[in-house]
Amino acid sequence: MTGSGLTAVQFGLGPIGSRIARAADGRGFEFVGAIDIDPDKVGRDLGAVAGFDDEIGVEVTDNAEAALAKNPDIVFHSTVSSLEVAKPQLVRVLSAEANVVSTTEELAYPWWSNASLGEDLDDVATEHGVTLLGTGINPGFAMDTLPAVLSTPMEAVDAVTVERVQDAGQRRKPLQEKVGAGVSVETFEADIADQAGHVGSTESVAMLADALGFELDEIDEAIEPVVADSVIETEHVRVRSGEVAGIRQTARGIIDGDAVISLDLEMYVGADNPRDRVEFIGIPSVSITVEDGYHGDIATAAVVTNVASTVVGAEPGLATMLDIPTSFTRRV
């Protein structure tokens, strides 16, 4: 198994953290601790909280130091998107000499927008001889690592467009709420638009630019609502015609006024033809499509747990997905 012989702590037991814990358990990681501040989870068995088949004898605690005293090989960290907010948590884990794989989106490639925070975390990880990686499906794979890998057999890349279409109706309730599903356009623009966007697009553009050797002048982003033209119902929300179904978000990497990297993310309930598509202009010009696309929640847990063993043996410091091998070992 991927994690055979490695001990782990799960830090954060929301929907994504719980899915990561289940995936890691299935890959052979041995959990020795779990951390969450939710009083409804503290004191309960990790297996019960995260939805394992059975309880495993590991109690969820809100005392990070107590869990980290178990000296885990790896900590799966899934709490917040903001690197500034996550930094104290990450420093605590790194200082306990534990390797970390985190879903904090701004950690995936902090060198454009959060360079000073990245440098601080790199210093802490290096000092304690451990490795820190931020990853997931997006950012971390679908819109950055995947196109970087697909560019390998190309003689030249002049520009790349990455399109990701996700049916938010198949995703967890907090994500449907985040993209504004079921609210009016006026409410979206007044109260939601600033928070509705997917965190990590800038990081993906910057990471992909690094992989392709582009020296960008700027990165710009835009977001707009996708409006439903019929009634759409999911397990969690009902969207009427004329209401917001979700978002379309674009991010562009610009050189001399031209977009050399274009990321187009559509995430709304009822999305037709979900897909992940990469289109290169270069030698040769090619297009690659993943029909139905990678399911965000499932794929995030898979990416995090599949790279974890590699992170344990990696060079100390803050790594990105460009720094580690992307070949994975499945459960046996």
Image (spheres, rainbow, N blue to C red):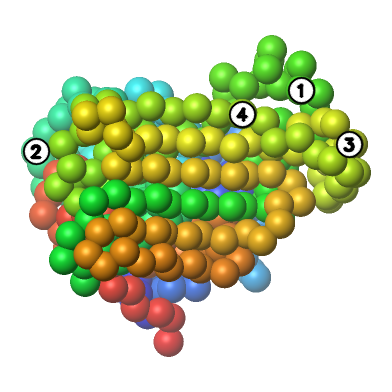
Q: Amino acid at mark 4?
A: Glu
Q: Which residue is mark 2?
A: 127
- Pointer 3 or 4: first along the chain: 4
Query: Residue at horizontal 71%, vertical 52%?
Result: 271
266 above or below 180? below
Q: Amino acid at mark 2?
A: Glu
Query: Residue at horizontal 67%, vertical 30%?
Result: 225
Query: Residue at horizontal 43%, vertical 87%?
Result: 332
Between disc 1 and disc 2, the foreground one is 1
Q: Nearer the viewer, residue 257 or 98?
A: 257
- Pointer 1 or 2: first along the chain: 2
Q: Secondary structure at mark 1?
A: helix
Q: Position of residue 94 (x, y in %)?
A: 24, 40
Q: Secondary structure at mark 2?
A: helix
Q: CA distance from mark 4 to mark 1?
A: 10 Å
Q: Amino acid at mark 3?
A: Ser
**Which disc, if any, is residue 241?**
3
**Which disc, if any, is residue 185?**
1
Q: Are marks 2 and 3 in contact (CB under 8 Å)?
A: no
**Is 100 situated left or right of 295 in this image?**
left
Question: How many residues crowd mark 1 within 10 Å: few (<14), some (14–19), many (20+)?
Answer: many
Q: CA distance from mark 2 to mark 3?
A: 56 Å
Question: How many residues crowd mark 4 within 10 Å: few (<14), some (14–19), many (20+)?
Answer: some
Q: Amino acid at mark 1?
A: Val
